[in-house]
Image (tube, coloured by chain):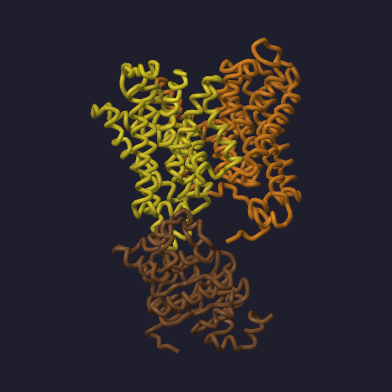
Amino acid sequence: MSSSTTTLLDAQEIYGGYGGADILKGTNLRANADEIVVIVGPNGAGKSTAMKAIFGLVKIRTGKVLFQGEDITNAKPEQMVRRGIAYVPQEQNVFPSLTVQENLEMGGYLMTDDLKPRMEKVYDLFPKLAERRRQPAGLMSGGERQLVAMGRALMVDPKLLMLDEPTAGLSPKLIDETFERIKEINAQGIGVLMVEQNAKQALAIASRGYVLATGANRHEDTGPNLLANPEVAEMFLGG
Amino acid sequence: MELASLFAYLISFLTFAGIYAVLAMGLNTQWGFTGQFNIGIAGFFAVGAYTSAILTTPESPAYLGGLGMPFLVGLAGATLASALIGLVIGRITAKLRTDYLAIATIGIAEMIRLFIKNEDWLTNGVRGIAGIERPFAGTPLDSPFGYLLVVVAFVVLVYFLLERAYASPWGRVLRAIRENEPATAAAGKSIARFRLQAFVLGAAIMGLGGGLYAHFFGFLSPEAFMPLYGTFLVWVMLIAGGSGNNRGAILGAVVVWGVWTLTELATDLLPTEYATQAAALRVLLIGVLLQVILVTRPQGILPEKPPKLIARKK
Amino acid sequence: MNDILQILIYGMVLGSVLSMGAIGVSMIFGILRFAHFAHGDFMTLGAYIGLTFIAVMGLSPWFALPAAMIGMAVVAVVIDQLLYRRIRRTQPVILLISSFGMALILRSLIQLIWGSENQTYASGIQFPWRLDVLGGLRIKPDHVWIVLISLGLVAGVHLFLTRTRMGKAMRAMSDNMDLALVSGIPAERVIIVTWIIGGALAAAAGVFLGIDTRLHPVMGWTTLLPVFAAAILGGIGRPYGAIVGGMVIGISMEMSTLFISAAYKPAVAFAIMVVMLIFRPQGIFKGTL
């Protein structure tokens, strides 16, 4: 386990939801800069809600979220971005009428320096986007849109990238490719925290994984260990 | 003011407030119960008023009708005509989202007003229809107080009918649609049909209000159906009283009509050369009142207390 | 033939006025998600602000135009910050009701400040140019300026929306509000810029209308329905769509006087709008909603 000095994100015992009953009931999540952390769990476990709560989109009633040791509980999304957290929602994660290039520009809206070098970095990572930079994002395929969405998030040079089901609705070939890209992003020193339905594949590339159920941690372990855990296997991986 | 004239004033005040209460309950059926944003109330109000006037006035060469029918036939006609117009409009606009429905309904109200203003053969145009008979002429009810009783009777009738409807399975579906349309659709309810029914019912009630107005006022002209009086005041009433709640609608009608009347008394103190400014000042006050309510108490004086059916989504 | 060309010119002038209003309505709808019912009265107020500059400073209407635009932009931002901002977190429909009330507030203020009578910017009749080539077609210089300045303003808005970071952020917000927030786009600043542009263009519409006809406290309200029609026709959130929508509605309204009573001009705009809402609600140019 990493020492606390390299802990990027530390969500401690968070409770919260959309105003009615709590959906998160004591969730704990941690992520380090060199890790790919995967959250899996059954439908309705609060995986997406946990991501949104960390990013300040869902109100946290009690509990704390620390980023690099500083308290960011319930901060505004704008402050999250300034601190180096980027979030890619599961659906509707591009600006459809804006071109690919404009989508990236919007990702870097808060950056005051020249966006060109950042944009080139994204295009290096996703050469497909470079070819289509003038095309409206709404006219692209699901897989391409996912790249635009990740590219948009990377424009702020984040320390932590949060992805909500990045492979949802993609073909098996594209799923493999997306996971490869995520590994590359992580290799550049960007911590990745993601929710995934394709648990088996995601845990295979994960440094660590969490299993959430009804808003609370059920299991926490390294990716391979979770894959080997018979209870986890029965819950999501079997069948 | 001496006592007798004060009393007469009070009767006329309550009569108007009662007519507005009917309109506000009509709007509540559309907005409060199903979230349909109708800002063309003036249109339905006008259709009701003119229908009843044409049915009941004595024959006239100037415009169509003058059928000389009794009061209650006029009111029934007003209700029916407005419901029919509501059916046509509702069918066209049923699928529109709120903002488009708002634009469409205000457009329809303007069209109706233009039509009334320009089609002299039917409505006598800008000259208007005069001499609309008071109801129950020649009976003991033929007095201002008698007419107040008639209006109150209709307010009570509409109130009880709507409360019955509200508590019925039909009313529960309506509220479910407003609270959570996707879930209600998923439960197999034809949303468009229920919304249309509520829209038509609301329109019918507004038409009834128009009929009552015609007989109380005795004279109709297109200017009475400008969006301000017909539509805006009714909205302020419903919002002030508490939408979704018929008692709120009635209370809102009395309170807002009271405020409106008081502003008239206040601005009457101004010299007559400021008459137009005084009218503008009254509208300004009511407009500001609406904004204050929206900012400070958007749920109104009497908020709706529905049995929670489905938890509000997110 | 000559008549038709003449009416076409009137239609384009009206179309320019409608476009200026429709761009604002369209942008406000795209970004704030509500139909702004006070927009017609924004136009009226802009026209009267122009009148004051003309009367007090002796400016010509054309120089009063930028002054009115700036003045109305300020008023729009103040109204937003004082009122709309407070209810923005509730349902959009509350904003709609509030803007309906704001329309009446503005109109009564205009009546209180400037009176209810018809007023004009300049007395006297402008002599039209006669184009003998086109069979003696008469064109008023004012009309030419109105159309040209409108086209210039639309081009300016287009460049702003496609070339500047703020303009792109406005399009982004109108595309996907949640994602714009997640990207760190400062929503409140974008909203203020939306009001600045919407208010300024409404003032332009009002001043044009005042130059073309006369000033009256309900001049904007009676134009609101055609403005909405133009915005819907052009596709919500599309400024270049709004100018096409404005022209189509304006020309149709003027052309209709060849067949039906001029009293029903607004009905023509309305009929086109209803047909559009039923068969192609996204507008000719596929708006963002």
Chain B's shade in the image?
Answer: orange
Q: Residue at x 69, y 49 (%)?
A: B191
Q: Residue at x 50, y 76 (%)?
A: A179
- The quadrant holding residue C74 is top left
Residue A106 % position (x, y): 39, 60
Judge from the rendering whether residue C255 lies leftward or rightward of residue B36; answer left or right.
left
**Residue C253 in sight:** yes
Q: Is residue C101 above or below residue B176?
A: above
Q: Nearer the viewer, residue B33 or A234?
A: A234
Q: Nearer the viewer, residue B64 or C20?
A: C20
- The quadrant holding residue C121 is top left
Judge from the rendering whether residue C86 lies leftward or rightward of residue A210; answer left or right.
left
Chain A's shade in the image?
Answer: brown
Judge from the rendering whether residue B17 lies leftward or rightward of residue C195; answer left or right.
right
Chain C's shade in the image?
Answer: yellow
Q: Residue at x 43, y 24 (%)?
A: B276
